[in-house]
Image (cartoon, helix red, strand yellow):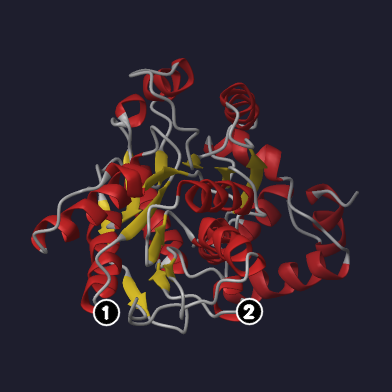
């Protein structure tokens, strides 16, 4: 391993001079800096980030905790965070909690042991008003940005989120404008703030259209393709005469659509369906999916902006980004009975 002492010996200068050059100190001439930097590169010198961290009390590391990179929503968010971090001279350690609270706590503790400068967290949502690991982060004053909606247990942290309520209302209004009056809603995971907001947006659209909420049209789904399939099977069994489905997210919508198509129903001739998220699969599904486009890449960028403010000792406000409707071929006017 090449040391500063080795570079100094080759350059005929002191170790302190080499150290100053590599720290870009102002009291070293440009010619000397250029000569020593070229020599360090030729010799294959790699800075010891651990030693630098001990001197500066920073590690130039961020921790990113998400459910799983296979979740198509997080792929773009993670990409944006990593690209901005790279530009700023930071590295990102990515870990998955797989929606298990005990694993989430272990992941966070491991990142804290690596002395990360800040954390980006997509929480495991729970109904409890507090969570010990989040209380510990607050006590440590670890710069933390929540990726998504806050719940009581993480309400003390900065966050970035989509305006899910308004976007869900727009999705329901789209179906209502097509003359659908019996719109089934496939709800997301209980206790998840994003799921609650999307349900509230659906209810608001019905209320504004002066339509009564029919509990027979509400089905508990979740967030996966399998959840959508189960909800669709339940709907077909209970036969509530829905002409459209509004799903909690695109995966649920795709799962529901798979079941409907397998049962011989035509989309949108027999039933329309709307998703939420605009994942890549939604555009290339066998029936291209009408959906809400979340600003995933922008969410990641805004999260880094909030983190930079935290690192400066400032308190960023909640960032709530709008989402827009993408109309494709999975929605149409209901066919006359």
Asked whether 270 or 91 is in front, the reply is 270
What residue did someone put label 1 on? Answer: 178
* Neighbour tally class for label 1: few under 14, some 14-19, many 20 plus, Cα within 10 Å: few
Residue at horizontal 41 percent and vertical 37 percent from the top: 143
User: Distance of mark 1 from mark 2, alpha carbons?
Assistant: 22 Å
On screen, 35 above or below 183?
Answer: below
Quick check: can you spot residue 210?
yes
Quick check: can you spot residue 89?
no
Asked whether 301 or 279 is in front, the reply is 279
Decide which of tag 1 and tag 2 comes sooner along the chain: 1
SS at badge 2: loop
x and y, in percent, of residue 57 in the image: 53, 35
Residue at horizontal 80 percent and vertical 64 percent from the top: 40
Q: Is residue 22 left or right of residue 289?
A: right
SS at badge 1: loop
x and y, in percent, of residue 1 in the image: 91, 49
Residue at horizontal 59 percent and vertical 56 percent from the top: 23
The picture quadrant where one finds residue 50 is top right
Q: Is residue 177 left or right of residue 263?
A: left
Asked whether 186 or 281 is in front, the reply is 186
What residue did someone put label 2 on? Answer: 286
The picture quadrant where one finds residue 254 is bottom right
Q: Is residue 264 left or right of residue 215?
A: right
x and y, in percent, of residue 163 in the image: 27, 57
């Amino acid at each position: 391993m090449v040391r500063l002492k080795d570079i100094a010996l080759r350059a005929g200068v002191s170790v302190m001079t080499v150290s100053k050059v590599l720290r870009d100190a102002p009291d070293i001439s440009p010619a000397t800096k250029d000569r020593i930097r070229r020599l360090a590169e030729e010799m294959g010198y790699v800075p010891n980030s651990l030693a630098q961290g001990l001197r500066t009390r920073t590690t130039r590391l961020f921790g990113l905790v998400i459910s799983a990179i296979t979740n198509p929503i997080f792929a773009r968010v993670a990409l944006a965070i990593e690209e901005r971090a790279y530009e700023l001279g930071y590295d990102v350690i990515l870990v998955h909690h797989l929606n298990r609270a005990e694993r989430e706590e272990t992941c966070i503790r491991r990142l804290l042991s690596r002395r990360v400068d800040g954390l980006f967290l997509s929480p495991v949502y729970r109904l409890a008003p507090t969570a010990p690991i989040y209380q510990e982060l607050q006590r440590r004053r670890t710069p933390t940005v929540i990726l998504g909606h806050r719940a009581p247990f993480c309400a003390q942290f900065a966050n970035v989120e989509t305006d899910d309520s308004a976007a869900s209302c727009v999705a329901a209004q789209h179906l209502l404008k097509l003359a659908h009056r019996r719109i089934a809603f496939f709800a997301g995971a209980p206790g998840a703030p994003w799921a609650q907001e999307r349900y509230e947006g659906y209810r608001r659209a019905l209320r504004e259209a002066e339509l009564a909420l029919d509990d027979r049209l509400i089905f508990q789904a979740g967030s996966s393709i399998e959840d959508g399939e189960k909800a669709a099977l339940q709907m077909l069994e209970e036969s509530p005469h829905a002409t459209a489905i509004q799903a909690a997210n695109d995966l649920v919508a795709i799962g529901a659509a798979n079941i409907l198509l397998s049962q011989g129903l035509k989309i949108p001739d027999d039933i329309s369906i709307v998703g939420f998220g605009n994942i890549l699969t939604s555009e290339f599904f066998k029936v291209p999916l009408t959906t809400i486009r979340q600003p995933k890449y922008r969410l990641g960028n805004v999260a880094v902006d909030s983190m930079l403010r935290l690192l400066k000792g400032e308190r960023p406000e909640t960032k709530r980004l709008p989402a827009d409707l993408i109309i494709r071929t999975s929605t149409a006017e209901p066919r006359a009975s």
